[in-house]
Amino acid sequence: MKKLQKVAITLGILILVSFPYIVPNPYLVRVAIMCGIYMVLASSLNIVIGFTGMFSLGHGAFYGIGAYTSALLALNLHWPFWVTFPLGGVMAALFGVLIGVATLRLRQIFLAFTTLGFGEITRILILNWDSLTRGPMGLPGIPIPTFFGMRFSQVGYYYFILLFTGLVVLFIYRLYHSRIGRAFIAIREDEVAASHMGIHLFGYKTLAFTLSCAIAGLVGAFYAHFARFISADQFGGNESFAILTMVALGGTGSIIGPLLGAAVLIIFPEMFRFLAQFRMVIYGAILIFVIVVKPGGIVGVRGVFEKPVQAIRAKRSHQKGGH
Amino acid sequence: MFFQMRKVRKTFGGLVAVNDVDLDVQQGTIHAVIGPNGAGKTTLFNCITGLRRADAGEILFEGENITDLPTHRIAAKGIGRTFQNIRLFPYLSVLDNVKVGTHLLNPTTLWDTALKSSRFRKLEKEVEDLCMELLHQTGLSEKKDQYARNLPYGEQRKLEIARALASKPKLLLLDEPAAGMNPAETAELDDFIRSLKAKGITILLIEHDMKLVMSIADTISVIDYGVKIAEGSASEIQSNERVIEAYLGKRRN
Amino acid sequence: MSKVLRAILLLAVVLGVVSNGYAAGKQEKAKTDEPVYIALTAPITGDYAEYGNNFKRSVEMAIDKINASGGVLGRKLAVLVGDSKGDPKESATLAQKWTSDPKIVAQIGDFTSTCCLAAQPIYDQAGMVQLSPTASHTKFAQGSKWSFSIVGTQAGEQPFIADYAYNKLGFRKIAVIHINNDWGVDTARYFTDNFKKLGGTITAIENYFDGEKDFTAILTKLRASNPDALFMAAMYNDGASISNQRAKLGWNLPVVGPSSLYSEQLLKLGGDSVNNLYTVVSFFADDPKPEIRAYVTEFEKRYGLKPNFHAALAYDAMMLLADAMKRAGSFDRDKIREALQATKDFPGLAGSITFTEKGDAIKQYTRVMVKNNKFELFDKR
Amino acid sequence: MIVQQLINGITQGSIFALLAISFAVIYGVLRLVNFATGATYMMGAFAGWLTVRYISQNIFLAMLAGLCTGWSIGFLIEKVAIKSLRGVARIASLICTIGFSIFMIEIATVIFGAETKAMPSFFNEKAFTLGGATVVWYQLFLIGTAVTILLLLQILIFKTKAGLAIRTVSLDFKTAGLMGINVDRTISLAFSLGGATAGIAGVLGSVYYNIVNPTMGNLQGLKSFSAAVFGGLTSIPGAILGGYLLAIVENFGVQIVSGGYRDIIGFVILVGFLLFRPRGLLGKKTSL
């Protein structure tokens, strides 16, 4: 079994690595790049929702903060991509810590709404802060990254995001099987019991949230230099909901789930372009169907979604005493 | 003094759940707290582990005041516990449940995790070994990959103890560990708790199974309506009039 | 396991470096019995769906007309429609889809400037004409030699409107309301600059975000600045809502606005409240010119509604593209671009089209006004 | 001008209040935010539009159509999605309501087309002028109708058996069941009620703004949610207060600051209240 798994993974990676050569079609390569971007976004959100059991509805904002940070540094200060890319992550992480510290003490559902509000505020601020962000005009002409003096071609972008997605998935895999990941999941499963194991709830929640934001910020920075034009409406509430949908559809709390969800939700609309206006109707219907039939998502860890309401209520009443 | 409670008081609304309770636990002993249902025993435990904040009084552990510390800090001082209504991590495997218990012993950093450093691997190995050892002791090693929620009730109790032990506590609070166990299992538990004592772990125990309590407890404190009404060895308690009255009086209601 | 993984990732890096610079999707020569494909990118669903659907209607109509008269260079034309949903990412993905398909020779669209700008780098890199009927963002046509817009920039339109307002209508104090997007900001900016230059006063400027339905607060605030007229940089739907609410507030004053207000929808949605509205057009559906009559009649027959400014622009875009292909004598993407760039006085429904060096169209405008819930030529009055 | 802004705010607030109630009724019994509320509002508006266009130019008939449509949608959402997800963490239900929202908006686009439709005005004559502010009859009608609905709801919730059931379930799910209350039916009722208020709000709003289109409910829904949090998600009077206050604050915000920051007001209130007073102005502390 282990061996078979190894072979499958190796084969899969080989296919991914040779993809632009097997399918030398820039359109398909672009779809693959978008898949990569959303796989990373969904995986990062999964750290918060799937592992730690907190709801965030503002993930698009952190993605946007990363994109704007990197783009503005590149456009205004002409810093190279290799500097602005990590800074996009750092900036998103900073905002993550800020929002986290302010809101993570709230009960789950309220965290969701606060992040929703924060996301909208971010979007509107980007739109109104003309002098910095050029407001509704957006930021065109973001430079193409160079690699040893060579400008990225589309295939270059593909390999970058492939590598980055691989690293993120590897990181999340290791996290999942580490002390820190176990602490996240323990918090999701039972906060009271977790704190009795010596887990600093607030600290670990903040860590999960910050990690998630940092990864979203990084991929945002990549997106800015890939799309080369960004505007506030690309990072609004719709984006947050789309990422959330990917996680929920693919499977919450598993490592593969968000990857699957992102792939399905990026590839499906492309495949069904011929359905024209029915495309989105079907999309909505499928979303309802999957959640009703399999609340944890296609390959989700059951625990996240199938926890009976009573258990949550019980926990809530305990928390009340705790504070 | 190893563990002390000084005039600890906890009220909920108008109800006094714990009323100026003093408690001394000697190191290396098994100390049982008994009392009728609703006497405030679990609240007492909750005050100790910081789940509830005591309204008055203080709690000292190894000479240090831990009254107002948050739960995870109290756990870090070396106090482990199990819960009356089992609180496992239902969708984690049996082994992972115990691994979470080792949280405090494991100084892995995020950096170690990301790079899978040799330190990370060494520490993970140690954790794995420790946890497997504990599962062997509790007889759960064969079920290590099952979800905790799928274990039968008795084994869930055992797993909770194993998880608490994984943090190598100095003081272990057991909240009704024998609840729902059959006599054979209870006898097993009796041996197991004794073996813990032999390893030097101090045990504070809430239990309704009087046979078990009388058999293993070095000291017994009796609580009724939040007030400590008696304390002493098994034989002293058995002959204490107030205790009998409390129990019988309760029954008459 | 992790060693294998590491090796593969390393391989990925190496391959990436080696292949950096690799490009695919070169155009092939297609057989002559196949149609020539034009791509249309438009928001068929989502917030801007009605504009996108108008694009689609007009382009399909234009193609039918071209094919009925024998096609271009002996070949039939066909259109492939892609729904961008008004989402810049979709628009860019479609751009990649179109450019990597050797069958497709040029693209028309998208509707919003944001979408056009997002797709621009892809058309630029692949070398395909990106002819937007409506993108007016100043950075758009300048951004690439492959990008063209025929709507005319606000830099061209607003001096004309400012003159209309100041000299023809005699307004001296104007309050401005504009939608807070790239188009609205540009429109408002060029208008206020030009109006001030003529000696007029801008009494107040307020903006609103896309999706807003309630304008009463903004209107009340603008009213307090006591202007002679209101300048409204909005699309016709919002324009109608603003007018309706203005009327409800009992605030009656003349309104001036850009050519995007010209639509039957404005009259239908705005009712009596849009009377006394002054705008300019480069396409006027009631124009007696035979080609416009023919277009309007045909459009009404096919789709049961009157074409508006955006529909006419899309029609022009398609006709212009066909004309450019004829002039180029080829379906080569490069040749089409050159021919398009060389366009001079192309007789479009929405005015004749000549491209600047940057790829912006210079347009001519006609003054119109709404009277008795109908658009009328102003100068005929 | 201040009077005018106040009147604008109260009119707009009436629509917010109705939608905020829709959030509050459902949140009350199930602790679930129904993200399909904006879409229900839109569907209600379309029902009203169809009535006015094809049946009769009667606003009351249109409102009835909006009510019935909203009621059915609420009922349907509960039956299809919420009921089967009862034992499951709330985020699944939440995502399901997002799915319904997408579905309804897109199906409306397919059926009715994306073009904005004109909704006729009713009672559009000027009623009176007050301190330089113009008030049209419809504004009074809108405010009056909203207040009537709010009062009816209050009576329903505080004076009827069904209302008692709703209140009990919102206090404690399990105990309500033990006390012999039909929890299933109560939740279903709450969803239908929530849908109905959103549906009526859709008709009222579309008549006030004279437009109907598939995306009309998006921003309206989000803002009304802020309003509901503002007033207290678990309290119906709170939601009403939140609706009116948010609209008034927004209108004065535009007056004092600028239209560009208008939407921020709502969201800052949302975030601020969640952080510092999550139960809102009137919400009960214990029932959060």
Image (cartoon, coloured by chain):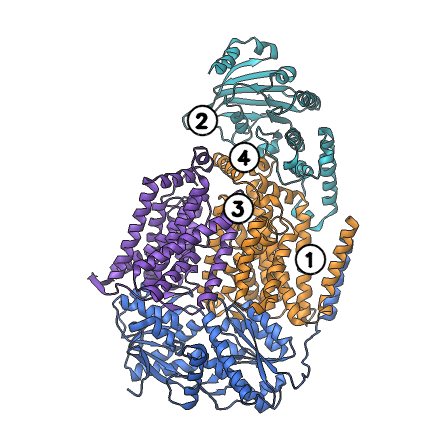
Chain colours: A orange, B cyan, C blue, D purple
Residue type at mark 3: give it.
Answer: Leu
Residue at numbered disc 3: D85
User: What residue is shown at x 34% (from left), y 75% (from top)?
Assistant: C267
Marks 4/3 in contact by CB < 8 Å: the verdict is no
**Numbered disc total:** 4
Callout 2: SS: strand
- Residue B11's disc number: 2
Q: Residues within 10 Å of mark 3 (few under 14, many from 20)?
A: many
- Residue B70's disc number: 4
Residue type at mark 4: give it.
Answer: Pro
Q: Which mark's residue is nearer the viewer, 3 or 1?
A: 3
Subunit ID for the residue under disc 4:
B
Give the Cα separation between the discs numbered 4 and 1: 39 Å
The answer, for residue A86, to whether it is visible in the render is no
Residue type at mark 1: give it.
Answer: Gly
Q: Residues within 10 Å of mark 4 (few under 14, many from 20)?
A: many
Callout 4: SS: loop
Left-right relation of B213 to D273:
right
